[in-house]
């Protein structure tokens, strides 16, 4: 049996936490032993970068961090096969110098390939490149029976798409084969400028949609009643002759600063965050600012600070991300959402907007529309407000992103994810008839308790 430990585990939001029996298998045969001898519930866990309770299973959490071997990398084709515990940081460090980049990159590179597939993560280019799973050629999945199944978009298709975004419910992903995209340099040409309203922000997304590779908007939720000014940024891959950094020299940078302990919960308050946001906003003007920016600064600015989640104190925080389908009144909807939250005196220290296309898979978060990600300290007020926002989002045909969720209720989950969630349950019943793979999230959302 693999190494076994009792420990308190959390998601990245540090809420909730749970005492968990955890295993750290190193070899495939450790998983054989685990599945044949451990009779209780089980759940795979990558690097714990999902924010809420998705990667917590008190009876048996299987940490994949030692299943971290790269099995093969075809530098001519840009195809990488790796164990599920290999991180995106490892993949970038290996592949970028050879001219290949993961097509979908979330806001941190410290995620495992298994976790990226199980959450079917997205990046700032969703409307162009879709979700992570769209670029995965195959996975090897360990079912509750111990059987290993190779799943592709052709063979065991249902299992492939039920595992993509399936939050660990079908089994343990052991390996992932990923198709990378070619790049000519390790930099992007960015264009960034201030916008004074949500209408200008959405107009910027519409304008840059056809001629950029990435787009992201940041809203200063502390100013203008929460739904006003912000910064819009578009980016495209740059060629070496445009000043792009040489691929060969790409080194995944070390963490520049590490927060050694939790800060008091009051450190991030309205005053400190208003000052920070003001400073951030004033770095830009209404003039379009063009820069050549390295991958790391564009994709992963937050990774420069290790454990930045400790800024919120021990009580932790919620990152809430919802998607609002595109509609003629989308500007009004985004404005209403942000200002209603502001009026309730719940201020989001981060408010990021991205544009998505329709996603693939049973539990894809993405529809054609705009996602809004917000950070709230874990307070009574936030815990009361978020379920109200869930309802408001569901009423508009929107969805909450499960990788960041900690509070959604079962009825709203089924309203948001609709028939597709019911179809997913059918696949789960076949893949895991005894309901062995569960988590605190699946218990909360009653995924494996329905008849
Ligand atoms: C700073 C930051 C920025 C982020 N930005 C983005 C973003 O831009 N876009 C986005 O989509 N997400 C984003 N996220 C969320 C993050 O990308 C996802 O939650 C990701 O899946 C976490 O990977 P992990 O390895 O830490 O998985 P964990 O958090 O450990 O697990 C997440 C889920 O995957 C399952 N799982 C993990 N490994 C396996 C496996 N081997 N087999 C089966 N199931 C498995 C777990 O059971 C759990 O349900 C961000 C998170 C952070 C902290």
Image (tube, rainbow, N blue to C red):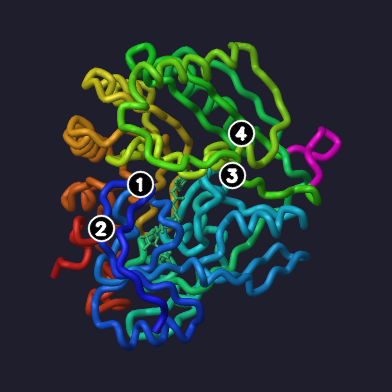
Q: In which quarter of the view is residue 442 placed?
A: bottom left
In the displayed structure, 200 sits above or below 137; it is above
Q: Circle 1 is placed at which residue position?
A: 404
Mark pair 3, 2: CA separation: 27 Å
Residue 267, x across and y down, in percent: 36, 27
Q: Is residue 48 left or right of residue 236?
A: left
In the displayed structure, 64 sits above or below 259; it is below
Residue 45, x across and y down, in percent: 40, 64
Q: Is residue 448 left or right of residue 374?
A: left
Q: Is residue 341 left or right of residue 183?
A: left
Mark pair 1, 4: CA separation: 29 Å
In the rendering, which numbered label is found on residue 255? 3
Q: Is mark 1 within 8 Å of ligand 1?
A: yes
N-term mark: 3 or 1: 3
N-term mark: 1 or 4: 4
Q: Nearer the viewer, residue 226 or 43?
A: 43
Considering the numbered disc 2 on the image, is that residue within a helix, a strand or a loop? strand
Q: Quadrant of the N terminus?
A: bottom left
Mark pair 1, 2: CA separation: 17 Å
Q: Residues within 10 Å of mark 1 (few under 14, many from 20)?
A: many
Q: Residues within 10 Å of mark 3 (few under 14, many from 20)?
A: few
Q: Circle 4 is placed at which residue position?
A: 210
The residue most toward the left is 451
Q: Is residue 373 left or right of residue 20?
A: right
Mark pair 3, 4: CA separation: 35 Å
Q: Magenta span: helix, strand or loop, mainly?
A: loop
Q: In which quarter of the view is residue 161 placed?
A: bottom left
Mark pair 3, 1: CA separation: 23 Å
Considering the numbered disc 1 on the image, is that residue within a helix, a strand or a loop? helix
Mark pair 4, 2: CA separation: 45 Å
Q: Circle 2 is placed at which residue position?
A: 18
């Amino acid at each position: 049996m693999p190494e076994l430990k009792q420990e308190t585990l959390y998601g990245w939001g540090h809420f909730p936490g749970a005492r968990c029996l955890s295993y750290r298998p190193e070899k495939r045969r450790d998983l054989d032993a685990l599945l044949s001898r451990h009779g209780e519930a089980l759940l795979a866990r990558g690097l714990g970068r999902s924010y809420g309770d998705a990667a917590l299973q008190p009876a048996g959490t299987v940490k994949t961090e030692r299943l971290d071997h790269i099995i093969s990398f075809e530098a001519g084709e840009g195809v990488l096969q790796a164990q599920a515990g290999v991180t995106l940081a490892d993949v970038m460090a290996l592949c970028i110098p050879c001219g290949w980049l993961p097509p979908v990159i979330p806001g941190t590179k410290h995620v495992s390939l298994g976790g990226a597939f199980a959450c079917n993560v997205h990046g700032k280019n969703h409307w162009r490149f879709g979700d992570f799973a769209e670029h995965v050629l195959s996975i090897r999945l360990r079912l509750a029976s111990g059987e290993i199944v190779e799943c592709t978009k052709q063979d065991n298709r249902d299992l492939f798409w039920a595992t993509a975004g399936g939050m660990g419910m079908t089994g343990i992903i052991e390996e992932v084969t990923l198709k990378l995209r070619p790049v000519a340099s390790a930099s992007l040409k960015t264009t960034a400028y201030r916008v004074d309203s949500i209408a200008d922000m959405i107009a910027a997304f519409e304008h840059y949609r056809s001629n950029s590779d990435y787009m992201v908007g940041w809203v200063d939720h502390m100013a203008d009643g929460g739904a006003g000014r912000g910064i819009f940024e578009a980016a495209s891959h740059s060629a070496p002759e445009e000043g792009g950094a040489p691929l060969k020299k790409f080194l995944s940078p070390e963490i520049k600063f590490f927060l050694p302990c939790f800060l008091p919960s009051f450190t991030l308050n309205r005053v400190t965050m208003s000052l920070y946001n003001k400073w951030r906003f004033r770095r830009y003007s209404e003039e379009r600012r063009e820069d050549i920016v390295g991958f790391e600064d564009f994709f992963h600015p937050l990774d420069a600070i290790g454990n930045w989640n400790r800024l919120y104190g021990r009580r932790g925080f919620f990152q809430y991300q919802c998607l609002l389908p595109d509609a003629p009144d989308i500007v009004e909807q985004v404005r209403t959402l942000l200002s209603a939250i502001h009026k309730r005196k719940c201020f989001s220290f981060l408010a990021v907007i991205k544009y998505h296309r329709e996603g693939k898979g049973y539990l894809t978060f993405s529809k054609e529309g705009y996602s809004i990600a917000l950070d709230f300290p874990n307070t009574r007020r936030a815990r009361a407000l978020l379920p109200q926002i869930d309802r408001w989002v569901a009423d508009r045909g929107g969805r909450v992103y499960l990788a960041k969720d900690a509070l959604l209720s079962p009825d709203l989950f089924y309203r948001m994810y609709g028939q597709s969630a019911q179809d997913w349950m059918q696949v789960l019943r076949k893949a895991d008839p005894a309901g062995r793979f569960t988590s605190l999230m699946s218990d909360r959302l009653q995924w494996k308790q329905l008849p």
